Image: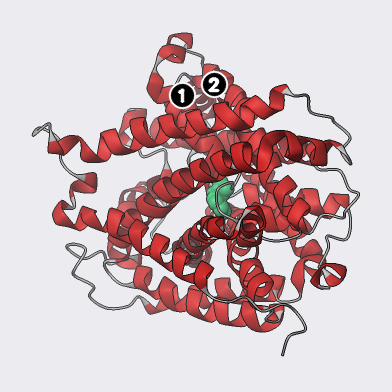
């Protein structure tokens, strides 16, 4: 039987590190601190904690628990509930494949910046700070005029990208048990690097002003729905749920091992890392705005703008050791993100394929990495950033939320929240009470419904009834790709679910 030979985490600690490693990623560094600053400073921790406890943790427990119950990745779990649901496991798997395609490129840009930091290629002092924006958009990306203008391929990025996919391949091709040490490495290393960068940041002039702007609380924000949308959507993205992979990660937990306690530890490990990252980010941002004597609103404090423009600018301004701080910061970005990437590939794509078709992990990993690398090339063209933006909106926002909504409904109501709860409790340190059923059956789906309507449809379709609004990102008809890509992932998933499966051992 396939079950007898199922891969396993070597122990509880490895499982927890694997879970933390897949959860912590770029979002912890470049989105969480920004949300805190934007939405009420320290007060934002209240909605965030509420969302972690009532929304994120039950959802993550569900994915781990279902994976272990059926001993399969996402598609096998839904097939176990009923053959007609199998596509619902392939959908987030397909979404995960598209995400890892561009996530890997962002990691490649980080590596590219590690190299550029050695010589401080964009310059030092005020001149370097002023050149940082142009360095990213005009030198590294050579951004073209729009979606259809692909220009040429950025070869240095491609070289870095190859390295990213190679690290991913070597971390996962021998399966879950053997990947344990990589998970531990890629959690501990970014922690050390982030602490080092934070210590440097905190000793710079202006750091305290930066931290004030990060954390000074504004409780009036708690009634703003944007704040709740920000918290819920960030919790979902940060815990890496709704991406298929956590089902597989749960399926590798030993039959008698704890799940609930590990889920809680992993979720708070993720939050703690995000909170710490805020110190690394805002101490340095505070230093930059003081050094340039400009208002905080003039610099980008989230996403690519933070990582690849604001941070390099601040590094230029540092009184000494610029190159070292640059190298440490970009290495921390790479190491914090790379295990999220191989989580997407391994748990999200490779495990479902090996489960269904009985292929070897090694061969499947090789081919997923090759095809993944090829899809990544799209983002190495001069139009790459535009496509990244569109695909990101399509899959990591709509894909994650819609597939998560359907999954929680089918599992909570059809499979049965109570049955899952009893399965979790049968081996877990922390027992969850019947109230947990209602979190899964109502709170999580309603939270997701709110996110997809309030932060999704209302934003992206407002131009249909309000002529003062534009379509997503100002892309015109190009924004239709958001829906087109989503539809394609759905069709692929239905197609995969219709293929005949092959059990291990069949020839
Ligand atoms: N949780 C990761 C982050 O915070 C992002 C991610 C989402 C990774 C989904 C894998 C799957 O960056």
Asked if residue 204 can be seen in this view, the reply is no
Q: Position of residue 62 (x, y in %)?
A: 68, 42
| Furthest-left residue in this view | 467
Quarter of the picture containing the N terminus is bottom right
Image position of 125 with respect to 43: above or below = below
Along the viewing direction, whichever of 266 and 499 lies nearer the viewer: 499
495 sits to left or right of 72? left
The quadrant holding residue 195 is top right
Q: Position of residue 280 (x, y in %)?
A: 58, 39
Badge 1 crowding class, 10 Å Cα cut-off, few under 14, some 14 to 19, many 20 or more, is many
The quadrant holding residue 253 is bottom right
| Furthest-bottom residue in this view | 507
Q: Position of residue 481 (x, y in %)?
A: 26, 58
Image position of 493 with respect to 20: above or below = below
160 sits to left or right of 8? left
309 sits to left or right of 361? left
Along the viewing direction, whichever of 300 and 322 lies nearer the viewer: 300
Asked if residue 437 can be seen in this view, the reply is yes
Along the viewing direction, whichever of 232 and 315 lies nearer the viewer: 232
The residue that appears at 64% across and 72% down in the rendered structure is: 356
Q: Which residue is mark 2?
A: 47
Q: Position of residue 354 (x, y in %)?
A: 67, 74
Label 1 near label 2: C-beta < 8 Å? yes
**What element does badge 2 sit on?**
helix
Q: Indicate which disc, 2 or 1, sits on the residue closer to the N terminus.
A: 2
Along the viewing direction, whichever of 177 and 441 lies nearer the viewer: 441
Q: Say which mark, if any, is on residue 236.
A: none
What whole-number distance in Å separates the C-alpha atoms at marks 2 and 1? 6 Å
Q: Which residue is mark 1?
A: 228
**What element does badge 1 sit on?**
helix
The residue that appears at 88% across and 39% down in the rendered structure is: 426
């Amino acid at each position: 039987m396939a079950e007898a030979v199922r891969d396993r985490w070597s122990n509880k600690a490895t499982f927890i590190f694997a879970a933390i490693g897949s959860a912590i990623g770029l979002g912890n560094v470049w989105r969480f601190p920004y949300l805190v600053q934007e939405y009420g400073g320290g007060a934002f921790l209240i909605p965030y904690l509420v969302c972690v406890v009532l929304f994120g943790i039950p959802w993550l427990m569900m994915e781990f628990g279902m994976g272990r119950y059926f001993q399969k990745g996402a598609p096998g779990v839904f097939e176990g509930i009923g053959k007609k649901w199998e596509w619902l496991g392939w959908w987030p798997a397909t979404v995960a494949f598209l995400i890892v395609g561009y996530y890997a490129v962002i990691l490649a840009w980080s590596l590219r910046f590690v190299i550029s930091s050695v010589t401080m290629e964009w310059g030092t002092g005020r001149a370097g700070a002023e050149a940082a924006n142009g360095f990213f958009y005009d030198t590294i990306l050579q951004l073209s005029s729009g979606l259809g203008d692909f220009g040429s391929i950025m070869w240095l990025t491609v070289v870095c990208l190859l390295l990213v996919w190679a690290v991913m391949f070597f971390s996962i091709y021998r399966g879950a048990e053997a990947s344990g040490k990589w998970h531990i490495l890629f959690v501990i290393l970014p922690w050390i690097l982030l602490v080092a960068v934070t210590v440097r940041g905190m000793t710079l002039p202006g750091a305290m002003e930066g931290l004030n702007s990060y954390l000074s609380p504004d409780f009036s924000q708690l009634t703003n729905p944007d704040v709740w949308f920000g918290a819920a959507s960030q919790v979902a993205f940060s815990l890496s749920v709704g991406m298929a992979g956590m089902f597989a990660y749960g399926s590798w937990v030993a039959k008698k091992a704890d799940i609930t306690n590990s889920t809680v530890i992993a979720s708070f490990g993720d939050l703690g890392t995000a909170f710490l990252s805020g110190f690394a980010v805002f101490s340095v941002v505070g230093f930059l705005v003081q050094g340039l004597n400009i208002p905080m609103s003039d610099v980008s404090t989230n996403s690519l703008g933070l990582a690849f423009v604001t941070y390099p600018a601040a590094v230029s301004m540092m009184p000494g050791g610029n190159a070292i701080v640059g190298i440490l910061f970009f290495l921390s970005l790479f190491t914090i993100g790379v295990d999220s990437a191989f989580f997407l590939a391994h748990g999200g794509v490779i495990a479902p394929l090996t489960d269904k078709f009985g292929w070897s992990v090694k061969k499947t990993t090789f081919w997923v990495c090759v095809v993944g690398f090829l899809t990544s090339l799209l983002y190495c063209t001069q139009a790459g950033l535009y496509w990244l933006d569109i695909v990101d909106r399509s899959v990591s926002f709509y894909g994650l939320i819609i597939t998560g909504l359907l999954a929680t409904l089918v599992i909570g109501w059809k499979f049965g929240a109570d049955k899952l709860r009893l399965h979790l409790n049968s081996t877990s340190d922390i027992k969850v009470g019947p109230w947990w059923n209602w979190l899964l059956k109502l709170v999580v789906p309603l939270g997701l419904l709110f996110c997809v309507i309030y932060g999704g449809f209302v934003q992206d379709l407002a131009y249909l009834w309000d002529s003062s609004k534009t379509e997503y990102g100002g892309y015109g008809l190009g924004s239709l790709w958001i829906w087109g890509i989503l539809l394609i992932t759905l069709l692929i998933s239905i197609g995969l679910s219709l293929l005949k499966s092959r059990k291990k051992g069949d020839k």
